[in-house]
Image: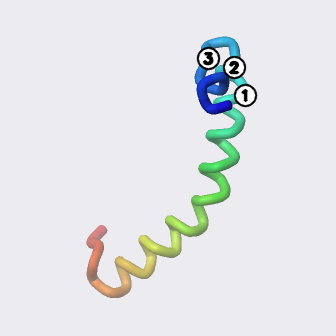
Amino acid sequence: MMDHLHLEENAKLHYKIYRKRFADFLPLYTRIIEEGVEEGVFRT
């Protein structure tokens, strides 16, 4: 299935899946970065 997903004719589907996955992980990444800043692990 993954081979078919990356075909040029499936670019629109690939983009939709990418956007959904990014949106799903964004809150997690936000929390990780916020905690890292609070703990001094990350600097802004």
Query: Image quadrant for the N terminus?
Result: top right
Label 2: state its secondary structure: helix
What residue sits right under mark 1 in the picture? 13
Question: Label 3 amino acid?
Answer: Leu
Image coordinates of residue 41 in percent, x first then y, are 27, 78
- Give neighbour class at mark 3: few <14, some 14-19, many 20+ (Cα, 10 Å): few
Question: Label 2 amino acid?
Answer: Asn
Nearer-N-terminus badge (3/1): 3
Task: Return the mark for residue 7.
Answer: 3
Q: In the displayed structure, would residue 31 be above or below residue 19? A: below
Image coordinates of residue 7 in percent, x first then y, are 61, 17
Image coordinates of residue 25 in percent, x first then y, are 59, 59
Q: Are marks 3 and 2 in contact (CB under 8 Å)?
A: yes
Name which residue lies at 72% across and 28% down.
13
Image coordinates of residue 21 in percent, x first then y, are 64, 49
Is 9 positioned to the left or the right of 27 in the image? right
Task: Return the mark for residue 10.
Answer: 2
Task: Report the Cα–Cα distance between label 3 and label 2.
Answer: 5 Å
Name which residue lies at 60% across and 50% down.
22
Question: Label 1 amino acid?
Answer: Leu
Name which residue lies at 52% across and 74% down.
31
Task: Report the Cα–Cα distance between label 3 and label 1.
Answer: 10 Å
